[in-house]
Amino acid sequence: MSQDETRFISADGHVMEPPDLWLTRMDQRFRDRAPRIESREDADYLLIEGLEPAAVTDLIGTMANEKAEGKPILARNHNRYAHVRPGALDPALRLKDQDLDNISAEVVYPNDAMFIYAARDLEYRRECLRAYNSWLAEYCSAAPNRILGAGMLPGGEPVQWSIEEAERCAKMGLKSVMLPADLPRVPYGDPINARLWAALQDLGMPVSFHNAASERFDVDQFPPTAGGTMMATVHLKIAGQLRTFASLISSGVAARYPRLRFVIVEGGIGWIAAVTRLMDHWWEDHHHWLEPKLEEPPSFYARRQFYHTFEDDRAGLMHLPLLNGDGLMWGSDYPHTEGTFPHSREQIARDFADLPAHTRRKIVRDNAARLYGIQ
């Protein structure tokens, strides 16, 4: 293989929203309520109406800078917006970081904007997401073949808002759309969402669910300690994404819309085989009376329509014989600390050491290229 052929595609990276994004882009009637960054004595804080202030920590990649430089991470609340990794804000510098990390293209998700899903005022939330999507399209336009944006849909009622925003995202050149993860206020299997799923299927855009983009996110439910952050990570990445995956299948959404492609982002892959087998076991015993009716076992829909991203999951790769290798996609999670930047080569070499070259290439490049139409 040539060097170009072995370059990775990251199915999960993050952009950093400019601190004045919402202050300058939201409709004037929302401007005084816009999400904003406030500098306090201990750290910079993200302020979103109706939510508790959240200290910017791993969100902006300042801790990731420490990790990349080989420095220990000594505290949680010491981060400043001014210290964000420049490539997370500037697409030209992002391309240099991609080259440094052997990456030829990257699917990018929000940072601060993910927490807007927890806002209670749905009209306010809609306007926040509209402003973000417009900015994201401009960011990605600097290198549309290398930076592929995932637009954010409002979700919930009225579904027409999400349909209109999905259509606008497609026109702006964004490559996928995302909805709240975990258990949304309006269940995805609710008949209210039927028009949304049909419209997304017709658009042909992958539908993503990122672990931190939840309507249920509450910074107060976990202690402000390293242990609390660890608890939050397990809850969001595994428990929340497990529920997303299971609900889309058990509610019949995947069965009813066979051309939809779902991406469970940053949830890891070590749990998939066990959960899918448990769902199949239940279906085998109870499918005669199960509602909604599933004609095939859950594993059929999981294999046909679901993709999963991960960055550091050696245990998951050891379960590869039980998984659908065509639905796994590696991601660097740039610029977060749990990501692999700037050591993705080394991480992949370790994790894939016992796997055939064609399997490695499929997971670190080809699956994402096929899903997102990357040449």
Image (cartoon, rainbow, N blue to C red):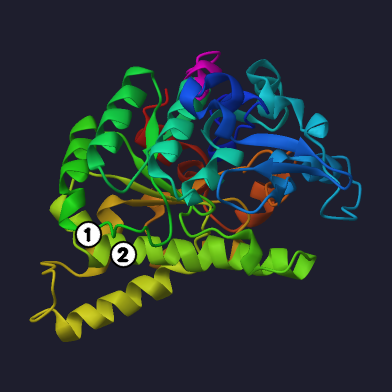
Task: Please give the range of residues in magenta.
Answer: 135-144
Q: Nearer the viewer, mark 2 or mark 1?
A: 1
Asked if the residue at tag 1 contacts the one at tag 2, i.e. Cβ–Cβ closer than 8 Å, the answer is yes
| Residue 264 painted magenta | no
Q: Is residue 80 above or below residue 246?
A: above
Indicate the position of residue 343 as horizontal and vertical percent values.
74, 42
Which of the two residues, 159 or 140, is positioned nearer the viewer here? 159
Q: Quadrant of residue 230?
A: bottom right
Classify 10 Å Cα crowding around label 1: few (below 14), some (14-19), many (20 and above).
Answer: some
- Residue drawn at point x = 20 percent, y = 58 percent: 190
Q: Is residue 143 magenta?
A: yes
Secondary element at tag 1: loop
Left or right placement of residue 155 versus residue 22 in this view: left
Is residue 34 visible to us here?
Answer: no
What quarter of the picture does the N terminus occupy? top right
Residue that numbered label 2 is attached to: 247
Q: Position of residue 49 (x, y in %)?
A: 56, 44
The mark that comes first in sequence, 2 or 1, is 1
Disc 2 crowd, CA 10 A, few/some/many (<14, 14-19, 20+): some
Q: Name, please, the residue furthest toward the left.
A: 288
Disc 2 marks which amino acid?
Ser
Check disc 1 and report the residue beneath it: 189
